Image: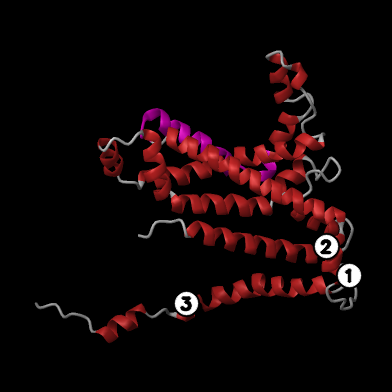
């Protein structure tokens, strides 16, 4: 029996998307996500307190954000946390990926161990590390055990150390994900490229610079975008560990949005802060994506 090749018209009909299959999910998504987001953003231009009537006040809330010392401080903390966690997480994640890239019995045990913290809820991680950083916690106990009592301190109670303690907690939780993405990138590199470069006399550092890093560009793009965006939205760990203190030393924009809405009842002002954070995340993501994609090697 002779097979009949499909006609171009038949192929086009087969490739057409049956939109009615996705109509209901798209409608529900628009109803519970898109519409509330857009409608909620309108409150940023009002004086709504969460209950009762409201009046239109234009850009007043946004002008207040620009001159609010607490908002400016929170924005600075947010950027510092996003940049520091992204940098440290990528350095450690790439180092772990290079060390655990080979398929050995030991590496098959270590990889899940480094990835395990990412499976924990951020609140649980915050509680664990709040104990570790407490004045009588595990970290100070270890310092005393190795006769480094001069380094003991209330890590979450000092403005100079609190924000970095939170940053290291976030890195500890998510460095395993960064490691896994880098391992996937490393294993996609053909070994023949390194072998040919070694035959030509290239050393390990030069092969890493000229072969490994350029071919890891897609993995680097993902591993820079995800931690940076996550750092800009950081909330859970800070709420549990420091509640934004001491003072406003660790308060982020996300935590300030929560406080303004549910502690002070300034829903319109908190919505303005949320709009500012959304724009910040979107702009930062687009700039980074454009910059990082330009360095990726064409397929």
Residue 131 quadrant: top right
Quadrant of the frame with the N terminus? bottom left
- Above/below status of 20 relative to 34: below
Inter-mark Cα distance, 2 to 3? 46 Å
Query: Which-is-in-front pick, marks 2 and 3?
Result: 2
Image point (87%, 78%), residue name: 56
Q: Is residue 118 magenta?
A: yes
Let me know if residue 255 appears in the view: no
Main SS of residues in magenta: helix
Q: Which residues are magenta?
A: 102-125
- Residue pictured at 81% horizontal, 62% vertical: 270
Identify which residue is drawn at 85% across, 58% down.
Answer: 260
Farthest residue toward the front? 201
Q: How is the image coloured?
A: secondary structure
Of badges 1 and 3, the one in the foreground is: 1
Q: Crowding near pointer 3: few (<14 within 10 Å), some, many (20+)?
A: few
| Chain-order first, disc 1 or disc 3 | 3
Which residue is label 1 attached to? 51
- Residue located beneath label 3 in the image: 21
């Amino acid at each position: 029996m002779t097979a009949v090749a499909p006609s171009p018209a038949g192929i086009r009909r087969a490739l057409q998307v049956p939109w009615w299959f996705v109509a209901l999910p798209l409608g529900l998504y628009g109803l519970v996500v898109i519409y509330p987001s857009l409608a909620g953003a309108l409150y940023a231009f009002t004086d709504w307190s969460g209950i009762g009537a409201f009046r239109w006040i234009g850009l007043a809330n946004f002008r207040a954000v620009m001159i609010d010392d607490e908002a400016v401080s929170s924005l600075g903390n947010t950027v510092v946390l996003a940049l520091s966690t992204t940098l440290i997480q990528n350095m450690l994640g790439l180092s772990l990926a290079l060390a655990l890239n080979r398929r050995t019995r030991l590496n098959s045990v270590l990889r899940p161990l480094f990835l395990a913290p990412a499976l924990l809820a951020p609140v649980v991680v915050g509680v664990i590390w709040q104990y570790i950083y407490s004045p009588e916690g595990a970290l100070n106990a270890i310092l005393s055990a190795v006769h480094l009592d001069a380094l003991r301190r209330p890590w979450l109670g000092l403005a100079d150390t609190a924000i970095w303690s939170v940053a290291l907690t976030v890195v500890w939780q998510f460095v395993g994900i960064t490691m896994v993405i880098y391992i996937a990138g490393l294993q996609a590199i053909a070994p023949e490229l390194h072998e040919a470069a070694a035959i030509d006399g290239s050393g390990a550092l030069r092969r890493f610079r000229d072969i490994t890093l350029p071919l890891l560009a897609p993995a680097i793009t993902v591993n820079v975008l995800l931690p940076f965006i996550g750092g800009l939205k950081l909330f859970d760990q800070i709420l549990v560990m420091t509640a934004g203190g001491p003072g406003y030393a660790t308060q982020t924009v996300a935590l300030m949005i929560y406080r303004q809405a549910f502690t002070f009842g300034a829903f319109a002002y908190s919505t303005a802060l949320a709009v500012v954070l959304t724009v910040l995340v979107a702009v930062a993501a687009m700039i980074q994506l454009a910059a990082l994609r330009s360095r990726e090697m064409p397929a």
